[in-house]
Amino acid sequence: MGQIPVYRLVTCACVMIAHNKPKERDEAVMQYQLKINGETRTVDAEPGTPLLWVLRDELQLTGTKFGCGVAYCGACTVHVDGYPTRSCQTFVEDAVDSEITTIEGATDKVAQAVQEAWREKDVVQCGWCQSGQIMSAIGLLTENPKPTDDDIKDYMNGNACRCVTYVRINEAIKLASQKLEA
Amino acid sequence: MNINVSRRGFLKASAAGTTALLVGINAKGVLAAGSTATAATDLNPFVKIDADGTVTVIIKHFEMGQGTTTGLTTLVAEELDANWDTVVPEFAPADVERYKNLFFGAQGTGGSTSIANSFMQYREAGAAARDLLVRAAAQSWGVDASTITVENGMLSSGGKSGHFGEFVAIAATLSPVEKPAVKTPDQFKLIGSDKLHRKDNTGKTNGTAMFAMDVNLPGMIYAAIIRSPKFGGTVVSFDDSAAKDVGGFIAAQVLPNKAGVVAFGKNTWAAFQARDALSVEWDFSAAETRSTDAMIADHVALLDAPQFDANHEVPLASVTPILEGAAKTIDAQFTFPFLAHAPLEPENCTIEPVGDGVRVHDGCQFPTLTRPMVAATLGIDPSKVEIRTLYAGGSFGRRANAASDYNVEAAMAFAVSGRKVPVKLVWSREDDIKGGYYRPMSAHRAKIGIDADGKIVGWDHRLATKSIAKGGPFEMMVQNGVDPTSVEGVAESLYTLPNMGIGLSDFTTAVPINWWRSVGHTHTGFVMESLMDMVATETGQDPIDMRLAMLDPSGANQARMIEAIKLVREISGWQKGDKRGFAAHFSFNTCVAVVADVTVEDTTVHVNKLFMAVECGVAINPDVIRAQMEGGAGYALSAIFRNEVTLTDGEVDQYNFPDYELLRNPEMPEIEVAIVSSNNAPTGVGEPGVPPTGPAVANAIFAQTGKRILDLPMTKAGFDFV
């Protein structure tokens, strides 16, 4: 490779922003107050920004993962007012009045049972989808504490796992259900 | 002894003022020990034991889910007699001298070799550390070393006992034995145990495990790249006026190699949005512009005149007269599509300026490639490139390639940004599906001669595919023009196949290709085991009995395969005339045999259950082996059912998971895995579950419908899957 051209002399990202961005752009940035994991967090974001990227890039809640960006894999699943929701297709402005729970804040009884079951069954491989799988599983067991095999498969259909840990995911959900019953 | 000890920054600091024992290999490649209290230079350890008794095992192979953080830890903990619960894994830095893969001579992970190449090395490091601690305790207590027992992280003798940490200060002053005694298999407590849980369980279930994409650094900017829509195209010019309306947009620059334009943003979303708003004029003069149908036809045409003989003992030309004299022949032609790896964490890499060098944050599969490639891109010495290996959200081969493509892209983005702030390059899923480095397309044609007694007398096998190894740092693998990764699985079959000639032709395209979980075996396993099924059908033999008769038990691997086949026959309750499918394949020194139970209604297929038996030598972590068989099988099903990357006029047709659909939870069959009990040295498990699964399912579909599947994915034969 030849010499790397240095196109612009910059000292920090801020300078680059100031250099390149028309002033009026800043007016588009809005301040939002989000209720996340029981705390109120204030963030600056462009309207239309997916909640996923606010969580990951602005709030460093990186347990929520990016897999497809089109609500097709479930890696970004969080709870919005208790329901498993794809954060990649949830605009930040639409999340303002809701209670948001991410994997970092999943600490209730159902969450604990699910996480323990996941560890006992050694479900994880690469792990990238597992926050989303767990958030969906918590949603399932909260709605339906004693799911059948078919209930589990139907509910978990939207969460893809490229390592294909499905057999163990389903076993872990059954185990968590038993733990909650005990 | 005078041991020079490194305290390279990667090692987590020991408690202030205390000593930690290090055991590893020194620059001469021999076992050495030392202490973190000594200031010096030349030891990177495999084991570190702190004064509080914590045992850290340095993991030289990255973790993409295959279980290295558990497996390598097991090897050390076994010989050390450590308390499993207090042993923690930590990823190694880039240091090829100490942390090379002993099979490659380079620091990298692949070929299902992580356990196999480390088996004695990590055990000896654990055994050496144990011996040092025993001698230190003997000295401290004034007793004979032979009176000391070690169990669960504790040393005892007579009435005295203490944990490892109490003896590290003395142990660090002793010389390790040259060749420490390791346990015999009957002494194993952790190796082979079903009670160990994965070391990455907790972090991967509470959101704290750190993957490369989770890196957040002060002042960091984000980058996304628009690449040529046709592979091999280059940038002529670009217009970023629309990008300037994207909030958080910083700047756009042509990459120095003109392969694309990078957009910088204040966050990932801004970078994606700005990238999508760029308008680029491309030069397609060197680009691939064919469509898939034409490329398949070009592969098939190459079968007429093979360029290389892959079996030197049996030139292809010598087989022709034998086939002409055969009582009958079986003829078949197969085609396979490009496949994306689609790791669920899309490709990403962060380059951080550190002093006069950089730190690369990556789920780094091959530091020996990444380090010099990043250094060359930035015009700095490789010693100025530090690699921080983080968990990788899958790879399946994608993260190891000769071009280190996304690492180099990140370095180029960092270079054009001005090199002052950390730059995180993130690929979208669309980038990943459309971005190349695919499992190569391939075509096979076979003509098998059978005599009047139903015996195979000759076999003309031809295949065409693009070489993975040629034209890069892996070129040394090529012998007499033959890239072994193109023909592996057809060449050197375990079966006794008389007069088998193999002709190979290299396909040429600008589409970048790469190894994909099980590499050449992804297509050769399907072809060979489909052909064996065709021979069994044609000659009226039971598919399992026929294969057993074609395996010579005097061969070590043949004997292992016989065991795997017999085991899967037993657990599946296979009967003569069985309407299920069978396949077996040897890859990465491991034997896997599969029975597939499927239901076919009209053209709709459901795989009910897979039975798998594996011979992979001594089972270090049986549950990890089962998990890799489950995952390998599922990875194969996704591909054979419906996955393909197709091109129209050189542009990829698919864009994301809606049209590159991964296997889903309800589609996963029940699965039963049995492991052959063995004291052979351990062999690979990450890949070998893939190759036999596809043909077992195809053979089951044939058993039920009489339809032979020759062109993948199976949707091309009119089947759909539920």
Image: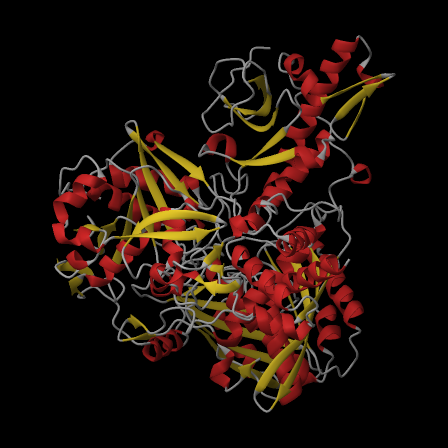
Q: Image quarter for residue B328? A: bottom right
Q: Position of residue B55 (x, y in %)?
A: 64, 29
Count of numbered circles on the image: 0
Residue at the front extreme, as displayed: A97
Q: Is residue B364 left or right of residue B152?
A: left
x then y, percent, for residue B182: 73, 31
**In the picture, which quadrant includes the N terminus of chain B?**
top right
Nearer the observer, B79 or B413: B413
| Residue B528 screen position, x and y as percent | 58, 71
- What's the colour scheme? secondary structure
Does residue B384 sit above or below A126 in this rendering? above
**Residue B689's quadrant in the figure?**
bottom right
Residue under the point 70% across and 51% down: A120
Res. B534 image quadrant: bottom right
> Percent position (x, y) of residue B696?
63, 73
Residue that protrudes farthest toward the bottom in the picture: B602
Residue at position x 79%, y 68% in the image: B571
Q: Nearer the viewer, residue B237 or B549?
A: B237
Of all residues, the one furthest to the right in this rendering is B158
A157 is higher (above) or lower (below) than B32: below
- As rendered, which of B268 and B606 lies closer to the eye? B268
- Does the rendering let one see residue B636? yes
B49 up-or-down from B218: above or below? above
Instruction: Say whether residue B677 is left or right of residue A56.
Output: right
